[in-house]
Amino acid sequence: MMNFIFFTTLVLALGDAASDIDASYLEELFPAPPAATTMSLKNMLEKAQEESFAVQKALMAEESSKAGKDQGLAGFLPRISAEAAYRGNRTVVPDKEPTHTLSGTANLWLPLIDVGSWSAFSARNLRYQKDQINTEYIRQEVAYKLTVAYLQAESIALLLKLLREEAGAILAQSQIAAWRIASGIGSASEELAAQMELISLQQEYLAARKNYIEQCETLGEILAQDGPIAPEHTENINNFLKEPEGNAPEHLELTLAQKSLAIAEQELKSSRFNYIPSLISNWQIGATWPLKPEGDNTLALGVAVTLSIPLFNYSLIAGIKTQKAAARSARLAYEEQKQTLAREERLAMEDMRQISALSKLYEKQATLAEARLTLDMGDYQNGKGSALTVIESRKSHQVAKVRHLRQQYELNIARLKYWQRQGWPAATILGQ
C-alpha cells in the first residue's frame, strides 16, 4: 500500500515538474545556433558545380589553357598582311612639277616545314586536355567535400537536439529531487548530482554548438556564399548514397598524372625537333600608282624561301637536358601516384570496416543502456532505487545514444571516402 501511494505521488510530481520547466530557461542554458540559410544536399550539390570558387578557378585555368593552345596553332598557320603608302616629292628645280605616288603591298607568310612548331602545339593541346580533366576532378572533389561537411553538420544538429531533450529530462529530475527533499524522502546529493549532470550536458552542448557553426560556415565557403549555410534536415542521406556496382573507372588523379607525363614527354620531343631544319616561304606582291595620267603603273611579285638550319645552339642543348629531367620527374610522380592511391584505398577500406563494426557495438550498447535505464526508473518509481542510480543510468544511456548517432554518420562518411579513393564519380555515388 505504501509503495502504491509513493508511486502515485511520484508520478504526479513528475508531471508537475515537467510542466513547470520554463522553455526560456532551457533556451538560456542551451542556446540554439545562429540562424542560417537552409538548403538541401541536392540543391547544394547543384549550386556548387558552378558557383564554388574552386570550380570557377579550374574553369578559368581551362579557358587560359585553350587560349594557349590556339596561340600555339597560330605559330604555323599562314599569315597575311597588307600595307598602303603615299609618297609626295616637291623639288626646288625650276619647272619641275611635284610627284605624288600611291603604293600598296600584300604579304603571305607560309611555313612549309616546321616540325618544332607542330610538336609544341601538340604539347599545348595535351595541357588543355589535362586542364579539362582537372576541372572535372575539381567538381568531384567539391561534391565529396560538400557531402562530408553536410553529413557532419546534420549529425551535429541531431546531437544538439538530443542533448536538449536530455537536458529537459535532467531538469525534471532535478525538480523531482528538490520535491523529494522538501517532502523529507530524499537527500541533497540527488539534486546536486542532477545539477552536475546538467552542467556536463551544457559543456558538451556548447562544444557541439561551436562545431555546428563551423560546419555551416564551411558549407557557405564551399558554395562561395558570404554567410553560413545549414542543412535542411528534410532528407535521409541514405536516399542519396548509392553503392556502385562493377569495376571503378580509372581514378582522375591517376589520369592527371598520366597527362602530366605525356606533356613532359611531348615537350622533350619538341626540344629535340628544334634541331630539324625549318622551311618558310614569303610571298609578296606590290604595286605603285602615280597620281598623274602620264605616270607609269608598276606591279611587282616577289617570292622568298628561307631554309633555317640550326648548326649549333647551346640553349637548345640545355633545353633538351631540362626536358629530360622533367620527363623523368613526371614518370616518377606517376608511379608514386599509383602507389599512393592503392595505399589510400586499402586504408579507407579498413577504416570503413572498423567503423561498421563499432557502429554495431554502439547500437547494442545503446539498447542495453536503454534497458538498464528502464529498469532503474522502474525501481526508483517503486521506491527501491535511488535518484543517483537513475542519473547514472541516464548518463550512460545518453553517452551510448550519442556514440551510436555519431557512428552512423561516420559510417556514411567512411563509405563516401572509400568509394572516392576507388575513383567512382561523385554523381554515381550521390545519385545525381
Image (tube, rainbow, N blue to C red):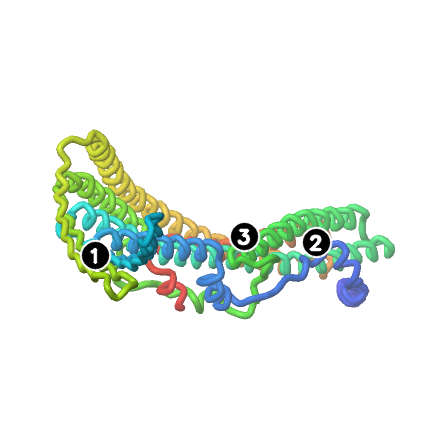
- For the residue marked with disc 3, what is the amino acid? Arg
Q: CA distance from mark 2 to mark 1?
A: 104 Å
Point out which mark residue 108 bears.
Answer: 1
Q: Secondary structure at mark 2?
A: loop
Residue 354 location (% of width, % of height): 40, 49
Choose top left, top right, bottom left or bottom right for residue 26. Answer: bottom right
Q: CA distance from mark 3 to mark 2?
A: 27 Å
Residue at the image point whose x is 47% and y is 59% from the top: 147
- For the residue marked with disc 1, what is the amino acid? Leu
- In depth, the one of 206 and 113 nearer the eye is 113
- Circle 2 packing at 10 Å, graded few (<14), some (14-19), many (20+), is some
Residue 263 location (% of width, % of height): 25, 46
Residue at the image point whose x is 38% and y is 51% from the top: 353
Residue 416 location (% of width, % of height): 40, 56
Seen in the picture, residue 128 relative to 291 is either above or below; the reply is above
- Circle 1 packing at 10 Å, graded few (<14), some (14-19), many (20+), is some
Left or right of 25? Residue 299 is left
Question: Can residue 360 be seen in the rendering of this structure?
Answer: no
Q: Earlier in the sequence, mark 2 or mark 1?
A: 1
- For the residue marked with disc 2, what is the amino acid? Gly
Point out which mark residue 385 bears.
Answer: 2
Contact check, label 2 and label 1, Cβ < 8 Å: no
- In depth, the one of 201 and 240 nearer the eye is 240
| Residue receiving disc 3 | 403
